Image (tube, helix red, strand yellow):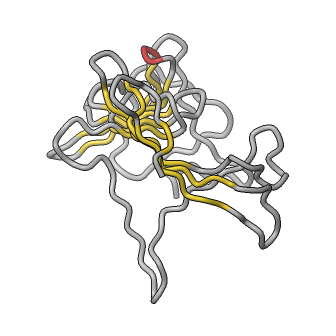
Amino acid sequence: GAKLTVSGDASITGELKVNDDVIIQNSNAARLRIFASNNDPYLSFGDNSNNWAVGVDQSNSSSFNISNTSSVPGTNDRLVITTTGNVGIGTTTPARKLEVIQTTNQAAAAFETRENGGIAVVELRAKDLSNPTAGLPVAQGPALAFQGYNGSSFQSMATIFASMEATAAANDMPSSLLFLTTPDGSASATEKM
């Protein structure tokens, strides 16, 4: 049987060291809650060569971090989720749903898919923001945007845009692929072909 059985609430001041498994079991919803009102609540994992922390970084607007550290999250962050749901890899302040930043001379991401006789693809999808249940209207569609840093901010270099030529309908997707580039002396991409 169990060495320690607690029925009801228990309060421990100081450390609780367990040299074996800890099992949380309930016939309904079992939970483990770690709460700190004025500090960073987190779980720490480690072995003989590495340490990881998973928890809340209050200094970064209470983001949820996975960090390569033996201390609190916020140092050597590997993945950050903001309270608005944005996810950052290589950045602690993602401004989009997914933002990946690589600061070394390597690709920031790689995508691999495997097909038996098909086409390996990355899907870019588009819906109308004001009416997402309707067919995509004319002159809308997904795009790949290329930006370059001008010394103070990122600006448009080029765009590949899949544009609807008429409103989309079932089994009817009239579209064209547009290529836009930015001319000298401008910060806006214009259609070239």
Q: Is residue 98 left or right of residue 175?
A: left
**Image quadrant of residue 169?**
bottom right
**Image quadrant of residue 15?**
top left
Residue appearing at x 46%, y 35% in the figure: 189
Q: Is residue 123 above or below residue 180?
A: below
Q: Is residue 178 left or right of residue 182?
A: right
Most foreground residue, 149 or 104 = 149
**Image quadrant of residue 35?**
top right
Residue 69 horizontal/vertical position (percent): 26, 32
Whether residue 9 is visible, yes or no, is: yes
Q: Is residue 182 left or right of residue 96?
A: left
Q: Is residue 67 above or below residue 105?
A: above
Residue 8 horizontal/vertical position (percent): 68, 35
Residue appearing at x 66%, y 51% in the figure: 126
Residue 21 horizontal/vertical position (percent): 41, 52
Most foreground residue, 150 or 124 = 150
Residue appearing at x 74%, y 52% in the figure: 28
